[in-house]
Image (cartoon, rainbow, N blue to C red):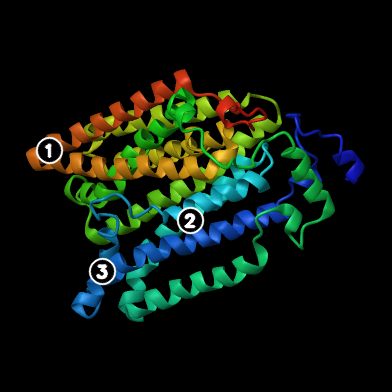
């Protein structure tokens, strides 16, 4: 398609972009893949120690159970194993402020973030095997080498601004510039703290970060324990089942991003409706499946299906409330993302602690109470988000053209 035909799409239109500008062979999709690899490397390196530690202590991995260490890899008690470093999370969202056209932002973010899930399930599947066959140092050598390779690719291929990228075509550069022409993304020298504190749409985003990560942190901390103590799954099998569930989440995040962009580009739904719809599905269905888990514990197959459906549907929140801060305040993406990590970490501390308390009081009824509380927390955050969420740039996040003496 010619550049002239592409120019018919103005910056403010919600019509789908031309096929040539939306192709997966674009520099921006290459950047998403590069971020995917970087997140993959970060995730594997975070899990390396928990995988290799049993072999380091015992000299070798337990014979006949190459994935036994994987079963406890998620059970670190703080729910933070899946969280990348804070400079990492903030910086990669800042990249998309200048690189992601509005009708492609969900898929680009989903592709990049899904690397976290892929890295975790990869270590769960092969980490114990590497410790047993090659020795525990090779876990660090192999995944550390992957991280080094990602760094070698990152420095020459990643650029903050499409205009500065040496490999981007003029058509793609102009398309991105036109798509972002009406977005006010340049940060101010000072933050409108008072206005931000009073902003209910911002609070709806921050509280969603807390509530929607609650059940995720519970799973990350206690999933192997639940599989072993309730569903009677041995340690080796629980490692593979945990990896299977992460694989479901990996696929669902990508599909959710593509679906959200498809609905937006075809003008099927408005941006606000997409954010609220995806958040609703990503909260209500996991809450339902988790509440039903104690009543289907007699069947491993049904329980695993419910857990898989819970993670699959909860992944839709990544294209809902979890990215809504880029809609209401793109110029403060870095600060708000960093602030949201505070709420995520609070959830990561409180949720496993409360869950541990329930289990210590009553091992049988404790799981029921854990799932009921998780659903209650999640739904309460959803209600607040549905009432106060917005999808347009807020007044306090716009450029200030007037000055006061």
- Mark sitting on residue 88: 2
Which of the two discs, 1 and 3, labels the residue nearer the N terminus? 3
Image location of residue 248, percent across then percent down: 44, 47
102 shown above or below 77: above
Left/right of residue 188 with respect to residue 24 in the rendered view:
left
Q: Nearer the viewer, residue 389 or 377?
A: 389
Determine the CA span between mark 1 and mark 3.
Answer: 28 Å
Mark 1 highlights which residue? 364
Image location of residue 319, percent across then percent down: 53, 37
Give the residue displayed 55% in from the left and 57% down from the top: 36
Determine the CA span between mark 3 and mark 2.
Answer: 34 Å
Residue 67 seen by the camera: no
Q: Nearer the viewer, residue 33 or 335?
A: 335
Q: Secondary structure at mark 1?
A: helix
Task: Name the mark nearer the viewer: 1 or 3.
Answer: 1
Quarter-wise, where is residue 262 in the image? top right
Give the residue displayed 81% in from the left and 33% down from the top: 10
Task: Name the mark nearer the viewer: 1 or 2.
Answer: 2
Q: Secondary structure at mark 3?
A: loop
Q: Nearer the viewer, residue 283 or 335?
A: 335
Left/right of residue 113 with respect to residue 27 in the rendered view:
left
Mark 3 highlights which residue? 65
Residue 159 seen by the camera: yes
């Amino acid at each position: 398609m010619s550049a002239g035909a592409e120019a018919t799409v103005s910056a403010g239109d919600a019509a789908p972009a031309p096929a040539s500008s939306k192709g997966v062979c674009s520099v921006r999709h290459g950047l998403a893949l590069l971020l995917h690899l970087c997140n993959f490397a970060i995730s594997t390196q975070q899990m390396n120690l928990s995988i290799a530690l049993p072999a380091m202590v015992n000299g070798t991995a337990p014979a006949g159970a190459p994935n036994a260490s994987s079963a406890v890899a998620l059970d670190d008690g703080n729910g933070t194993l899946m969280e990348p470093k804070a400079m990492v999370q903030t910086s990669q969202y800042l990249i998309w402020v200048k690189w992601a056209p509005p009708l492609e932002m969900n898929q680009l973010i989903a592709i990049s973030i899904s690397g976290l899930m892929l890295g975790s399930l990869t270590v769960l599947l092969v980490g114990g095997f590497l410790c047993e066959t090659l020795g525990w140092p090779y876990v660090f050598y192999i995944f550390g080498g992957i991280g080094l390779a990602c760094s070698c690719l990152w420095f020459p291929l990643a650029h903050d601004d499409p205009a500065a990228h040496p490999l981007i075509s003029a058509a793609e550069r102009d398309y991105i510039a036109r798509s972002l022409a009406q977005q006010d993304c340049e940060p101010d020298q000072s933050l409108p703290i008072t206005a931000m504190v009073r902003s209910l749409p911002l609070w709806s985003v921050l509280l969603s970060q807390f509530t929607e990560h609650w059940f995720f942190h519970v799973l990350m901390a206690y999933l192997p324990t639940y599989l072993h103590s309730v569903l009677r799954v041995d340690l080796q099998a629980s490692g593979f089942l945990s990896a299977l569930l992460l694989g479901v989440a990996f696929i669902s995040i990508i599909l959710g991003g593509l679906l959200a962009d498809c609905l937006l580009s075809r003008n099927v739904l408005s941006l606000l409706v997409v954010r609220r719809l995806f958040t609703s599905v990503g909260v209500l269905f996991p809450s339902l499946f988790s509440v039903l888990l104690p009543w289907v514990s007699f069947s491993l197959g049904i329980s695993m299906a419910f857990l898989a459906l819970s993670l699959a549907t909860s992944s839709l929140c990544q294209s809902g409330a979890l990215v809504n801060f880029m809609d209401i305040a793109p110029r403060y993406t870095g600060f708000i993302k960093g602030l949201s990590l505070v709420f995520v970490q609070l959830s990561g501390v409180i949720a496993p602690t409360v869950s541990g308390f329930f289990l210590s009081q009553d091992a049988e009824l404790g799981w029921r109470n854990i799932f009921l509380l998780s659903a209650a927390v999640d739904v309460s955050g959803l209600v607040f988000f549905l009432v106060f969420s917005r999808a347009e740039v807020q007044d306090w996040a716009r450029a200030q053209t007037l000055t006061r003496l």
